[in-house]
Amino acid sequence: MAEAEEDCHSDLVRTDDNERSGEGNLQAELQMFRAQWMFELAPGMTSSGLEPLPCRASSRGPGVKSVDARGKQEIAKEEKAKELFLKAVEEEQNGALYEAIKFYRLAMQLVPDIEFKITYTRSPDSDGVGKRCVEDNKEDDKMADLLSDFQQQLTLQESSVKLCQPEVDVSQTHISVLPMEVLMYIFRWVVSSDLDLRSLEQLSLVCRGFYICARDPEIWHQVCLKIWGRSCNKLVPYASWREMFLERPRVRFDGVYISKTKYIRQGEQSLDGFYRAWHQVEYYRYLRFFPDGQVMMLTTPEDPPSIVPRLRTKNTRTDAILLGHYRLSQETDNQTKVFAVIMKKKEEKPIDYHKYRYFRRVPAQETDHSFHVGLQLCSSGRQRFNKLVWIHHSCHITYKSTGETAVTTFDIDKMYTPLFFARVKSFTAFSEKPL
């Protein structure tokens, strides 16, 4: 019995010793881990922080080599990006914009900020690629030189210059086969006699060749002559005929100038005298200008959706329309004014002889009515030349028998509201004849 108790006691002592030794091993391992972790934070120092560890330098050798290899790879990548970027600059200077964009994209994929790591220099005597880079941050200059760049690029492509080439192989005849004269005649049909310059600008977006054709100075010169006549013989102060068309004040032909007038009028008194009616009167004025100097004017209570389609051509059947001519005048105060003389369409009515068969006919005095209109051309909002302000309106009655003319001038008051331009797409949907 005593021997059994001694054996149990010895087993308990052994287990306690084993547990204590296990805990001691864990503590030792934990201390070693902490020391190694601190050593990795300060790899060049000992645990005391005062003496270097020469034995660890040999263990750090492979890490240093990997860092050096990575640095060399970064340097090689940057050099490759610089080479691609300079190649893109060279292609851009030669006019090959598409190739330049491709090289720019490859360079920025390697190093996104490669543009700021290149030193720009310019030397006329050197032939190196890097010295041909030119720093140009003015977008306006790039757009101004776009036409010359396209022309240079087409010239460098082939000895026989073609304005455009098919993107894919086609069995039918491509438009690039047509001679330049035929293409320019097509462009004149696009502009047409209605001076549809909006369609010409849209056509220039097709390709580089069409862009060059749409910038032909002869087309824009003829457009300016149509609008201003002999007063635009000199190009100064504008840089081109296209710039003159865009900047110089003019009336617009691809729509209608419309004004809406409202007022309240007193009506007649009722029969019993207890009340008097009041009427709200509403009417519109329409002005349509044509490039050949003619103008149409209509005053009617009908709203624009029912009237505007009738104003597409001058051969309309609306009886109340007034036809005439207009001219542009630029005064000394740099204000452009529009003066027009309009009159009702003359319609010869057959004489009814049966009406005057049994009594003597008294001939009525024949007269001609004409209206003189003066308007000031303005711009409002983002649109240009889209507003006409009344400055003069008078009626001239000429008696044919005596030749005398009676003039009645109307006061320009709140009843003469400004006319605002509204573009009508159907006016330029068809071309009747070329420019």
Image (cartoon, helix red, strand yellow):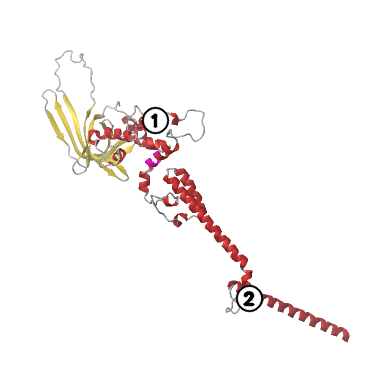
Pick the quarter of the image with the N terminus. Answer: bottom right
Q: Amino acid at mark 2?
A: Ala
Report the number of numbered marks: 2
Look at the image and tell me in which quarter the C terminus lies.
Answer: top left
Q: Position of residue 282 (x, y in %)?
A: 27, 38
Residue stretch rendered in magenta on the structure: 147-151
Q: Is residue 101 above or below residue 350?
A: below
28 to 359, vertically: above or below: below
Left/right placement of residue 5 relative to residue 256 reads right
Precedes in sequence: disc 2 or disc 1: 2
Given the image, on which type of amino acid does mark 1 rest? Answer: Met
Between 155 and 418, the one lying in front of the other is: 155
Classify 83 as above or below 18.
Answer: above
In the image, which disc is placed on residue 35? 2
Residue designated by label 1 = 180
Q: Does residue 394 appear in this view? A: yes
